[in-house]
Amino acid sequence: MRILSGIQPSGALHIGNYFGMMQPAMELQNEGEAYYFIANYHSMTSLFDADQRRKNTTAVALDFLACGLDPAKAVFFRQSDVPEVTELTWLLTTLTPMPMLENCHSYKDKIAKGLKPNHGLFAYPVLMAADILIYDSNIVPVGRDQKQHVEVTRDIAVKFNMQYGETFVLPEPRIRAEVSAVPGTDGQKMSKSYDNTIEIFGEEKPLRKKIMRLVMDSRPPEEPKPDADQNIAIQLLKLFAPADLAQQTEDQLRAGGLGYGDLKKTLFEHYWNYFKKARAQRAELENNLDHVNQVLKNSAQKARALASTVLDRAKKNCGLS
Ligand code: ADP
Ligand code: TRP
């Protein structure tokens, strides 16, 4: 079984990325051949600062490795170190109906948020399809917002297989229901583009502040809260604290008597503690960037070897060679 996923270096990674994609991806590295990459080509659709892209790319590599991605098990590389993927993208674009891309939520959401669409942003799902198909991937661990892109990938693969003969493996998304959309500090889905994130790594003080500023209502502590399970801090606490403790806290909030300030303090402690080991690991890796770069380079060689066999197969089947 081959598992593949990618993450854009478009900003600091947050706990939505962690629970929605990174943690499931790291668990899957023990269950098959895992290919994980930093989607730096994709980041070009919305980030236009070269230096920032370079910095973010290193940060994503450090974050992922510190959180437990094991380069002895998973192939971990930069998307642009496998340029074959852009050639496959062209082959796929010619079989991608315009309305399929026009219907993509992610594209529509970004435009609605005021992002000026470029052709790359529109064609983004086709590059993503090439990412997935070029490694004959079976399973794609992602958060819920990426499900439609994996469906687009399947549709394009089916069209190609029908038109040019059996070429691509059909992938399946792997989405964890309980963490498919981690809420941000404002209650919307947490996202780098909504300015509502809680980062995995960062300085203690500003992160504590962010958590203490989680948006709550104005009901007094003693008032019972029948909707305690909807509270953002409770939802986040469930990610970090042992299940019985999180449940106890939720029951207390429901019954009345637990103030939001105390609840947020409890949340912060568990969150901060949760990434303690990873923080130490990250500090160590930061002093060893040569090793990190070497991992990315070696992995890219492996990824490239596989990608070129699949690209050759596709080119042969559609009459290019
Ligand atoms: P962002 O929305 O912050 O830009 P990305 O689009 O780079 O995040 O997503 C990287 C991965 O993390 C994807 O698999 C995505 O589904 C997942 N992800 C992002 N935000 C969340 C969230 N709030 N809850 C669960 N998964 C998420
Ligand atoms: N579009 C994904 C995101 O924003 C990143 C990505 C690019 C990806 N290529 C991929 C994810 C291939 C899974 C498989 O999160």
Image (cartoon, grey):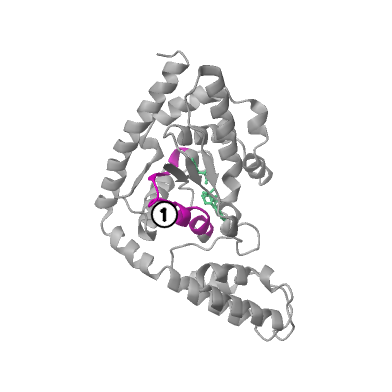
- The answer to whether 239 is drawn above or below residue 269 in the figure is above
Would residue 57 be visible to someone looking at this image? yes
- The answer to whether 90 is drawn above or below residue 135 in the figure is above
Q: Is 25 contained in the magenta span?
A: yes
Q: Nearer the viewer, residue 24 or 258?
A: 24
Label 1 belongs to which residue? 26
Q: Total of numbered circles in the picture?
A: 1
Task: Answer left or right for 226 relative to 50.
Answer: right
Relative image position of residue 129 (x, y in whole percent): 51, 34
Q: Which residues are magenta?
A: 16-41
Relative image position of residue 238 (x, y in whole percent): 56, 69
- The answer to whether 161 is drawn above or below residue 105 in the figure is above
Q: Label 1 crowding class (10 Å Cα cut-off): few <14, some 14-19, many 20+? A: many
Q: Is 1 contained in the magenta span?
A: no
User: Hey, which quadrant is residue 254 in on the image?
Assistant: bottom right
Would residue 204 be visible to someone looking at this image? no
Relative image position of residue 266 (x, y in whole percent): 54, 79
Q: Say which amino acid is labelled 1.
A: Met
